[in-house]
Amino acid sequence: MENFISHNPTSLHFGKGVIETIARTVKPLGSRVLLVYGKGSVKRSGLYDRIVAQLNQAGSTIFEYDGIQPNPLVDDVDKAAAIGREKSVDYILAVGGGSVIDSAKIISITIPVTHTAWKFYEYKAKPVKAIPLVAVLTLAATGTEMNPFAVLQNPETGRKDGYGSPLCYPVHSFLDPEVTYTVPADYTAYGIADLIAHCFENFFSVSECSLSDRFIAAIIADAMHWGPKLMQNLHGYDERAAIMYDATMALNTMTGNGKGGGDWGVHGMGHILSLLHGVPHGASLSIIFPAWMKYLNKKAGKQISQLGTLVFGDNDVEKTILRFEEFFTQIGTPVRLSQVGIGEEKFEEIIQLMIRNKVEGRSYKLTEVDYRGIMELAK
């Protein structure tokens, strides 16, 4: 087991109706708020009006930045930060899924500075302070609502990278499962795949921590229990609540305790698929992870066997991989590149960008030969 420090400062407000408590929660943060959201689904669902009513009740002056992309762009972060800086906002309220909340995290540390947010990702600058961030989650997937990490895309550099800082934790996150009723079936499935992939990434560390491994396996098993039920009943409160809680716990740093940081090579490969071909993040992971396990079964076979034992009560490596692949298919998320329109003629461009971006796992280092082998198994 590796040494670790465990600290999570986010206050999680979970359950039916918690959004109606936003006013009294944000009032101590100040009176000037930057409201950040996506392309408009929050308005169509009526959530926007509910949030604005809460902010008005708190006496906040509202400034807005909308239009955050599903694969969030650094340009939007810089533009929103400029508004926050000009208007001297006291806090940020982000309403959306992982893309919106990730963007808001980096906005929060960019407002106090004058340089582009990408300098943080290039490690040419360190954040010195953050504007307090309050999150209202609308999609169960990334766990961003209770962790310090954020992924951004920079088309100019051809990179999609993650960044983390203790300053990026939301101070409050509101999770009402009813808010996710409007998430369509495909993105519901992608979210389930995403949370399971986060569990995989932490499990496949070269460091062993039996309790963390059991936490991880329990989250995966719970998601595999509730996931198919949710896909059959998209307005089921218990189903939505279970998956929402699973997603939060999968990446709120608890599953990484003692594990030395996890692997994250599959996420690196998935980011390239999103960057070049717009593949939804969760879909990229459900495609690559089974292929990664098949390709690395000689190196990682012992861990795959352990995972199979913990989740399925069966230590057979091939059966474990097949069961995960069958589960992804069952909930309707892709397991082959061909299912998202990526044929072999596109492989070379993808592989070359993986090389350029130096995609590699922390525990299982990947090379060009490995990219090719994994892509071949995922085609």
Image (spheres, rainbow, N blue to C red):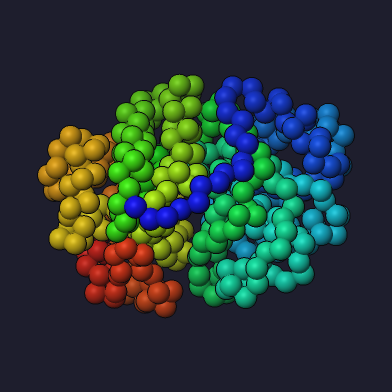
Residue 323 visible in the snapshot: no
Question: Looking at the image, is 238 positioned above or below residue 193?
Answer: above
Q: Residue at x 29, y 75 (%)?
A: 368
Horizontal and vertical percent for residue 247?
Answer: 46, 39
| Residue closer to the observer: 98 or 155 | 98
Residue 122 shown left or right of residue 92 in the figure? left
- Image quadrant of residue 72? bottom right
Q: Residue at x 35, y 65 (%)?
A: 361
Residue 320 shown left or right of residue 19 in the figure? left
Horizontal and vertical percent for residue 190?
Answer: 41, 44
Q: Residue at x 37, y 76 (%)?
A: 355
- Image quadrant of residue 365? bottom left
Residue 196 shown left or right of residue 325 in the figure? right
Q: Residue at x 51, y 47 (%)?
A: 6
- Quarter of the image with the C terminus in it: bottom left
| Residue closer to the observer: 351 or 308 | 308
- How many numbered marks does the figure carry? 0
Residue 274 shown left or right of residue 37 in the figure? left
Horizontal and vertical percent for residue 28?
Answer: 81, 37
Horizontal and vertical percent for residue 222?
Answer: 35, 31
Question: Looking at the image, is 254 positioned above or below residue 73?
Answer: above
- Image quadrant of residue 11? top right
Residue 123 visible in the snapshot: yes
